Amino acid sequence: INDPGTAIIAMRALFELYLYRLTHYPPKVLCNTVGKAAIVVEELSFEKIFTDTIIPIWNYGKADRMLQKELLILIPQLQQIHQKEVFKKLLSAVEKEQEKQLM
């Protein structure tokens, strides 16, 4: 991502995927044809997925007002679905960065 417009498009797509993942849980145990557990799947936590994908975008563009405004719209939308600490932390970082720019 090398410009704010592309970052915003990427974030919107990621937030759609986050929403899906917040509301759909992959099975942790896969069964064979007779119903016996055959495979136990270790899934990445939502928090790991979120931070591994959104933090690089934030780190690259955190001084950009367009990116900040978009995150101020997108994060509360996810918070309506689930109150996760990772959302609060990023929202706080965005708000702090905005305050810096206003001074």
Image (cartoon, rainbow, N blue to C red):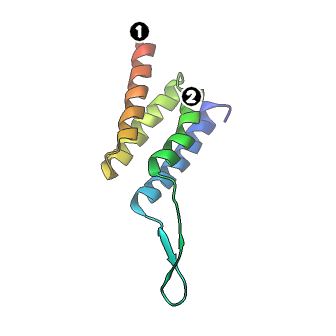
Front in this rendered view, residue 50 or 71:
50
Q: Residue furthest right?
A: 2
Coordinates of residue 31 in the picture (x, y in percent): 51, 80
Q: Could you tell me which quadrant the N terminus lies in?
A: top right
Q: Are marks 2 and 1 in contact (CB under 8 Å)?
A: no
Coordinates of residue 7 in the picture (x, y in percent): 59, 37
Quadrant of the rendered image containing residue 101: top left
Q: Is residue 77 above or below residue 92?
A: below
Coordinates of residue 77 in the picture (x, y in percent): 37, 46
Q: Residue at x 41, y 56 (%)?
A: 22
Front in this rendered view, residue 40 or 60:
40
Q: Residue at x 43, y 64 (%)?
A: 25
Q: Could you tell me which quadrant the C terminus lies in?
A: top left
Label 1 amino acid?
A: Met
Dot label at residue 43: none
Q: Residue at x 60, y 28 (%)?
A: 60
Q: Is residue 23 above or below residue 3?
A: below
User: Which secondary structure, mark 1?
Assistant: loop
Coordinates of residue 3 in the picture (x, y in percent): 65, 31
Q: Which residue is mark 2?
A: 59
Dot label at residue 103: 1
User: Which secondary structure, mark 2?
Assistant: helix
Of the residues under marks 2 and 1, which one precedes in the sequence?
Answer: 2
Label 2 amino acid?
A: Asn
